[in-house]
Structure formats: C-alpha cells, structure tokens
C-alpha cells in the first residue's frame, strides 16, 4: 500500500471520526464544520476532474455549484408552497429528486458552456468560463421571483428516505457517503481508457489526435461530468445552510474551489478533501482570531505554490503520480 | 493502392516545405521514404496525417480523400503514426499510454506485450521513467493499439543503442511478415533497404527518385543521400 493510500484512508477516517465524536460529546457545531468540509470537497472533486485530470482551469465552476444550490432552493420552495413549477410540474422536498434535477441541469449547462469555452485554451479558457459564470450570477441577482440579491431560504431541510435530515449527524453521513461515491467515480474515471485519454489530451492535444482521439469531445464530456458533481455539492450546500444566494455563483466561489484543489494536491484522489479540510480549519481557527484570515490563507497558498507544488498530499505523501 | 499521395505542396505559415511529392503504397507493402535532413520527409508524414494539411495536391487513403478531415479522423481511418522523438504521454503509465489509444481489432494489449515483452514488465511505470528504447517500443505499441492499416514510423531507431535498434528492427520485420503496410523513415540504410519493398527519395521538398531497394546504387546514394 503506497503512502498516499494510507494518508487517504486516514483523511477519510478522520472526517468520519470527528462528527461521530462531536455527536457523542454534544458539540453539533463540529458536525456542521465536517459537513461543510465534505460538501466543499465534493465540489472540488468535481472541479478536480476538469482541472486535475484534464488540465482545464475553469474559473466558472461556481456557476454549477450555484445551479445545484438553486435547483434545491427552487424545488424546495415550490414543494413547500404547493405552487406548480413549470408545465404543471410541482416542486419537491425529496433530496434524491433534487440531486437528479441539479446534476442534469448543471450537466446540460456544462455541455453548453464547455462547447463554447473548450474551443479556446489557456487564459482565454479561464476568462470565458469566468464570463459564463458571471452571466449566471447576474441572472440570479436580477431574478426577483427567487429572492434576487437577497437569496432564497429553504424553510425545512429536504428529505432523504429513511433518514432524519434535520439531525446534523444524519445529514453529515449523507454528505460523507456522496463524497466517497464521487471520489470512487473519480478513481474509476482516472483508471479508465477515457481517463487516460483525458490526461493524454492535457499533455498534448495534437499528439492525441494522431492516435485517433478527439480531444474536444473527451474534454467536453469531462467538463460536463465535472459540472454535475459540483452541482450535487451545491444542492447539499443549500440544504446545509437552508439558504441559497447569488454568492454561491460568484467568482469568489470559483476561486475558492481552485484554491481548495491547489492546497490539497491537483489531480490527486483525496486532494480536494485535504484542501477543503485545510481551508475550513484555517477559516475556523484564524477566523476566530482575526477578520483578515484570508491574508494568512494567502500566505499559506503562496507557500504551497512555491514550496509544495503537490499540495498538502504531495507534502505528506511524496511526488504527485498525476499532474 | 492503400495510400496515394499526388503532387502535394505543404507550407509552414508562408514558408513552403513541400513542392510536389508523389508516392504510393500498396496493401502489405513496406515503403521507405528517404532523403537527407531537411528534405521534407517528416513534413510529408505530417501532411499524410493531416497535422499539416497540404495546400494543393491530393492524398487518398483506402480509396477516399483525406482532405478536410481532422487528424483524429485520419488516424481513426487507419493511419497509425510513431512520431519522431517518440513522444509518449510522459505522466501516464505504460498501460495508460496503450489503452488511451486502443481501438478494437487484432492488436490487443496482450499482442503488444508479446511483441515487446518489456512493456508488459513495465506496465505500471510512468513512461517518462522508461529508457529511450523502451519509450520507442511504447510509441510503436501505442500506434499498434489503434489497429492501423498503415503504420508510419518516423526515425524509429534514431538515438538508440545498437542492441535496442536490433530489437526495434526485429519488431518491424515481424510486423511486415504479419502483412502490415508500413511507411518507414530511417537513416540506417543497412537495415532499411532489406526490409523495404520500394523506396522514394525526397530532395528539397520534391520526390525525385523511386524504385526498388536493389536499384539504389552508389550513384543514387551519392547524388541524393549524401553517402
């Protein structure tokens, strides 16, 4: 077993152990903190597929995170009020339905945004993904039916069959299982022919064409799957806070997701989880001391970029296998 | 004919590299493309693969024109390229390099490993950590995994140790006896000529001589190959 695998197991075990312990000693705040880590790690795992494996530096993944959040918020609002949504369809408070709607909507948005953005590369790709995310952001801000700038409250957390989602530990466990499933899917994709072709296209799109691979289609598929995973995280994030606002769609959020991946280790299986844990712990620990905790986060990020290019996982587990 | 190249002219930007290249290759044939450095051999190969599409002239593969087809489609139609300088996907393992390119057909992972047992031994090793010879085997294996009807080898033995070169030539001869069509560029005439069925010589971006290897006498070598 490689050192990275051991570290991965420890990370997964720690993320599970902390809320269980917090629940035992009656400290629900730490369960919420761990839930936040799991959800951000899920969103970053989605981005890691595009960025880490495909080399696609998307600065617009907040769009998918927000789409997931608004899917949860809008469906829950209509489910609660009983008002039909569109074409006579009603809302719902069932998480499973919400997740499907969130993932499908974001997948379609990912296909549309990717189909245009992936015709560019480098800084143009970064800018065009940012532009699309900002378009979605301003659309949400100017949409009064769903709260506009003020956002949208979800009065009661959505339901999951057989689980009391209002219990912090139960909701954490849902997020934890979804995160592990997403990491498992990431591992499967990375080990597949598709994953190899995606990584090959990242290294040299011309060279992959000479072996019959069409880089555009491979990347577009990866971008859409990546969008779906991030949207799922957005739907869970909305349920965690019982609130959705345009801030989920803002470029700060896109930047945050990139920061999580860089902190944890680009392209690595548990990089997003390591990054999200580090980010939330820094936010919590330093946020209690100073309001300008981002300054110190910036210093840490600088240190990682300069001295530990493999992120936290690279620092602990050695040189990156991928990326 | 499997491949027919008629009077192609290819440019890099505004600078013309090919001024009229003709060549033809039949199914199961090995064609050696020869000429001194800078005469247009690699550009001809890039043109055939549509990496640098010619501005004029025609290229047809298996009876259909390849013009206006993107490079990946030309590759899918059955042209497998082993590019100069090997160019494996550095951060992928041997296995990942091979499966990334795989298309259904006679060539499978097992068959490639039979041809180059070392690739099987190094299955989980990153390709950037392989020796030059092993990388070359991987580049050939990767092209074979696309199950090509035509394999193009551009300087496949360049810069390799003599003992490794022998392995590569042995593999090329095995591919020939298996009936694979091959377009070959190489400087080692002592190995190239016995394996080739026909030769085409380029000079200054033009095909200037074609014939059987036996017809390459000292005068031809002196005139076109600088030997």
Image: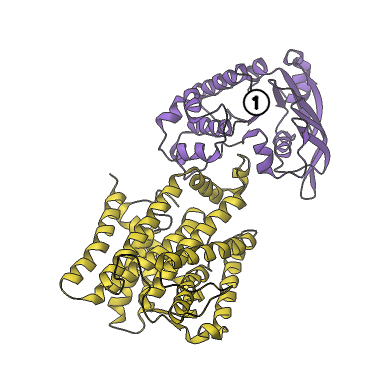
- Seen in the picture, residue B218 relative to A251 is either above or below; the reply is above
Total labels: the figure holds 1
Q: Is residue A220 visible?
A: yes
Q: Is residue A97 found left or right of A202 in the rendered image?
A: left
Q: Is residue A90 found left or right of A23 in the rendered image?
A: right
Looking at the image, what colour scheme do you see?
Answer: by chain
Q: Is residue A258 visible?
A: no
For this orientation, the residue located farthest to the left is A25
- Residue A315 in picture, x, y percent from top left: 33, 57
Q: Quadrant of residue A8?
A: bottom left
- Residue A156 in picture, x, y percent from top left: 36, 79
Residue at image position (33%, 60%) is: A177
Which chain shows up in purple? B
Residue at image position (50%, 34%) is: B135
Give the chain letter at badge 1.
B
- Name the foreground residue: B174 vs A60: A60
Residue at image position (33%, 68%) is: A37
- Name the foreground residue: B45 vs B176: B176
For this orientation, the residue located farthest to the top is B214
Q: To which residue does mark 1 refer?
A: B187
- Seen in the picture, residue A156 relative to A173 is either above or below; the reply is below
- Residue B81 in picture, x, y percent from top left: 63, 34
- Seen in the picture, residue A202 relative to B106 is either above or below; the reply is below
Badge 1: residue crowd in 10 Å (few <14, some 14–19, many ≥20): some
- Name the foreground residue: A275 vs A230: A230
Q: Quadrant of the N terminus of chain A?
A: top left
- Residue A100 in picture, x, y percent from top left: 47, 63
Mark 1 falls on what kind of element? loop
| Chain A drawn colour | yellow
């Amino acid at each position: 077993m490689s050192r990275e695998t051991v570290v991965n197991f420890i990370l997964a075990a720690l993320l599970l152990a902390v809320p269980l312990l917090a629940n035992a000693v009656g400290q629900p705040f730490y369960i919420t903190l761990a839930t936040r880590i799991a959800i951000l790690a899920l969103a970053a795992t989605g981005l890691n597929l595009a960025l880490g494996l495909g080399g696609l530096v998307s600065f617009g993944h907040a769009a998918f995170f927000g789409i997931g959040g608004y899917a949860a918020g809008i469906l829950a609002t209509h489910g609660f009020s009983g008002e039909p949504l569109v074409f006579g369809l009603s809302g719902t408070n069932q998480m499973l339905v919400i997740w499907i709607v969130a993932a499908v909507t974001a997948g379609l948005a990912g296909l549309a945004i990717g189909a245009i953005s992936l015709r560019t590369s480098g800084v143009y790709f970064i800018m065009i993904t940012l532009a699309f995310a900002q378009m979605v952001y301003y659309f949400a801000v100017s949409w009064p039916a769903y709260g506009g700038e003020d956002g949208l409250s979800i009065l009661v957390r959505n339901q999951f069959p057989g689980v009391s989602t209002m219990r912090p530990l139960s909701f954490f466990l849902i997020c934890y299982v979804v995160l592990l499933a997403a990491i498992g899917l990431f591992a499967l994709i990375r080990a597949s022919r598709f994953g190899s072709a995606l990584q090959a296209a990242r290294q040299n799109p011309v060279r992959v064409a000479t072996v019959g691979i069409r880089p555009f289609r491979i990347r577009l598929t990866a971008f859409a799957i990546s969008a779906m995973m991030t949207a799922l995280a957005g739907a869970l994030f909305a349920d965690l806070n019982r609130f959705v606002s345009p801030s989920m769609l803002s470029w700060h959020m896109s930047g945050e997701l990139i920061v999580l991946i860089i902190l944890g280790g680009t392209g690595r299986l548990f990089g997003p989880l390591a990054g999200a844990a580090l980010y939330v712990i820094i936010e919590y620990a330093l946020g209690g001391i100073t309001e300008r905790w981002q300054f110190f986060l910036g210093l840490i990020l600088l240190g990682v970029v300069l001295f530990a290019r493999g992120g936290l996982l690279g620092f602990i587990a050695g040189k990156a296998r991928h990326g | 004919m499997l491949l027919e190249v008629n009077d192609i002219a290819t440019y890099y930007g505004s600078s013309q590299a090919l001024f009229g290249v003709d060549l033809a290759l039949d199914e199961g044939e090995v064609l050696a493309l020869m000429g001194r450095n800078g005469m247009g051999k690699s550009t001809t190969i890039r043109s055939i693969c549509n990496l640098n599409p010619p501005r004029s002239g025609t290229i047809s593969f298996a009876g259909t024109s390849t013009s206006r087809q993107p490079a990946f489609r030309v590759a899918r139609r059955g042209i497998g390229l082993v590019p100069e300088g090997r160019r494996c996907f550095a951060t992928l393992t041997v296995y990942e390099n091979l499966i990334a390119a795989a298309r259904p057909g006679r060539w499978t992972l097992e068959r490639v490993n039979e041809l180059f047992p070392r690739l099987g031994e190094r299955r989980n090793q990153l390709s950037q950590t392989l020796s030059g010879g092993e990388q070359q085997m991987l580049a050939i294996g990767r092209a074979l995994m696309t199950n090509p009807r035509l394999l193009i080898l551009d300087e496949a033995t360049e810069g390799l140790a003599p003992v490794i070169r022998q392995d590569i030539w042995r593999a090329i001869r095995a591919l020939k006896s298996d009936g694979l069509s091959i377009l070959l560029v190489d400087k080692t005439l002592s190995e190239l000529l016995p394996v080739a069925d026909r030769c085409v010589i380029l000079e200054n971006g033009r095909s200037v001589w074609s014939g059987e290897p036996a017809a390459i006498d000292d005068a031809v070598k002196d005139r076109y190959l600088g030997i």
